[in-house]
Image: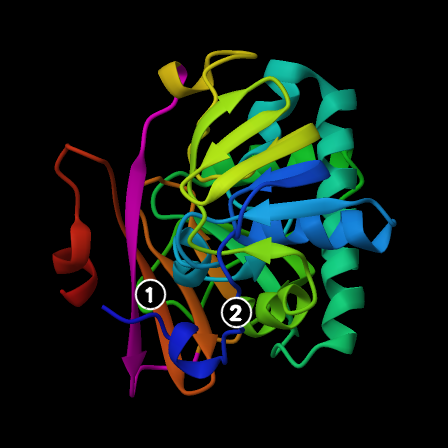
Amino acid sequence: MESVWETTAQKPGFDALDGNKSTHVLIIGGGIAGILCAYQLKTAGVDCLLAEADEICGGITKNTTAKITLHHGLIYDKMIRRFGEDKARLYVEAQTKAIEEYARLGKEIDCDFEWRDNYVYSLSDRNKITKELAALARLGVQAESASAHELPFPVAGAVCVKNQAQFHPLKFLYAIAKDLPICEHTKVTELAPHIAKTNHGTITFQKLIIATHFPTLNKHGLYPLKLYQHRSYVIALKGAQTIGGMYVDESDTGLSFRSYGNLLLLGGGGHRTGKKGGCWQELEA
């Protein structure tokens, strides 16, 4: 399986670690999170080094649907009820600032950055849509009820948030990464206080950022014991209808839609690893 992003972007290459090195901040993981951490640190004048076990952007990042949105599900009504309005508002502010930063960088990089409306739809529960619209209004987010008429099936309702975005993640990240201190094929095999042992030498550091998809350090919350892997699938379809907005089902087992050029990116079939799910068959059907 090839990623549509991978086949339409030119990847820079990086050497493996050669002997022992020292850095102020070590970043483990070369996906979008790790690369953006390294970029921000280097821009701020902080000495840093990124270690990637394989090649940068080789996992989730190259297989993402690449939507940039503050509304990735019907999350805000739940967030207000569970954590309170103040914390939900902080989350909105963080997401909004992130979108603004992507937009700023997207002006400088040829990465197919486009402003799009984002829709979260429900197939059967209009009440969820109503509650989410009320929650977004409380948080100062401009949102509106929508029919999601572009979709090839009827929905009970949708929440539309305008001025969200989509982009080509690998064009974006490869441009940012090319001048960063990155070691590919450098697998961290053991962590001790201020020391990381790798398959090509030892890295000493003052601060550590773990930006792997699944945390590798079993402390500060025991997250590896609490988390589980979840898988979903994306196919790129030629000759399908054009979708102007970005769409996602509020259900974890629903479908995601967005267009890229003449392709329709259809995502879904999600399931917990080891358990049954829709998989590729659902998307192909």
Residue 16 lies left or right of residue 154; in this view the side is right
In this orientation, does residue 133 appear?
no
In the foreground, 29 or 133: 29
Q: Label 2 is placed on what type of residue? A: Leu
Return the residue at label 2. Answer: 170
Residue 14, image x and y in percent?
A: 53, 65
Rate crowding at label 1 as few (under 14), some (14 to 19) or many (20 or more) other CA atoms within 10 Å. Answer: many
Which residue is at 60% across, 48% downward?
A: 50
Q: Secondary structure at mark 2?
A: helix
- Is residue 228 rendered magenta in the image? yes
Residue 127 lies left or right of residue 100; in this view the side is left
Residue 239, image x and y in percent?
A: 29, 88
Q: Residue furthest front?
A: 19
In the foreground, 83 or 199: 199
219 in relation to 49, above or below: above
Which residue is at 58% across, 41% downward?
A: 20
Q: Label 1 is placed on what type of residue? A: Leu
Residue 178, image x and y in percent?
A: 64, 69
The numbered mark, 2 or 1, whose residue comes first in the sequence reads: 2
Residue 205, image x and y in percent?
A: 68, 31
Marks 2 and 1 sit apart, C-alpha to C-alpha, by 19 Å
In the foreground, 256 or 135: 256
Q: Residue furthest right?
A: 45
- Is residue 272 rendered magenta in the image? no
Q: Secondary structure at mark 1?
A: strand
Q: Quadrant of the N terminus?
A: bottom left
Q: Quadrant of residue 243?
A: bottom left
Rate crowding at label 2 as few (under 14), some (14 to 19) or many (20 or more) other CA atoms within 10 Å. Answer: many
Q: Quadrant of the C terminus?
A: bottom left
Q: Magenta residues?
A: 226-242
Return the residue at label 1. Answer: 266
